[in-house]
Amino acid sequence: MTTESPVLTVKNEDAFLNDQAQAMRAGVYELLGRLLASEPTEEVLQVLRNIGEVDASEGEVAMGWELMKQSALKANEQDVKDEYLDLFVGVGRGELVPFGSWYVTGFLMEKPLAVLRTDLAALGIERQEGIVESEDHIAALCDAMAILIRSGTEVPFARQKSFYNDHIEPWAATFFKDLQSAKSAHFYRSVGFFGEGFISFESRLLAMKS
């Protein structure tokens, strides 16, 4: 497993929509999806430990990369697994409920999920067999965005924007803020900070592209 450690800024929308930049965006979504889908393995933690030099003064995303790196360097795999379970699984439920319907309506399995399933079907994206979580789990939405980005010209940029605006933008930043302040969060505090910064970046980027 590999990922890049870019410093993301929005200066010129056309320059940022080249293939390398798109791959970078997809890679970030995939990393967030992996960190939020299940307990991180030692391999995942090592990816973060191997993040290269980052100038944390260049913005929230850059600072988030550095915070995740430093948190991973201090992390113990078992402790991080226990933290994940406390945050997202728990006994009955975890401290946080990482589903879009919950954040938008206060309930699980509500209308936002039905709309999401219709949109995913139209895009040809299906839930993998054996996955019990509904499609509005934050990790699943990160994976869906990565798929759309990596589809290149098969999925117009406007479709990426529409999917993001409908299913991620209304609640993801709030989720990542909650993750930073969760009582059980230690390593995941840095993930929350990075996630909030990246969502802010994506919102600015997608707003620039009409």
Image (cartoon, rainbow, N blue to C red):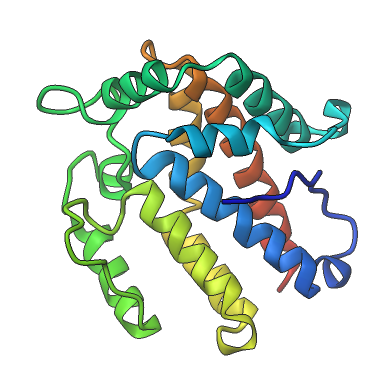
27, above or below 66, in the image: below
Nearest the viewer among 131 and 45 is 45
Q: Residue 40 placed where, x, y %?
A: 42, 34
Q: Residue 5 placed where, x, y %?
A: 75, 44
Nearest the viewer among 197 and 69 is 69
Q: Residue 137 placed where, x, y %?
A: 32, 49
123, above or below 117, in the image: below
16, above or below 133, in the image: below
Q: Residue at x 21, y 60 (%)?
A: 111
Left or right: residue 25 compared with residue 116: right
Q: Residue at x 64, y 87 (%)?
A: 153
Q: Residue at x 63, y 81 (%)?
A: 152
Left or right: residue 36 compared with residue 99: right
Nearest the viewer among 3 and 200 is 3
Left or right: residue 83 compared with residue 65: left
Q: Residue at x 61, y 39 (%)?
A: 47
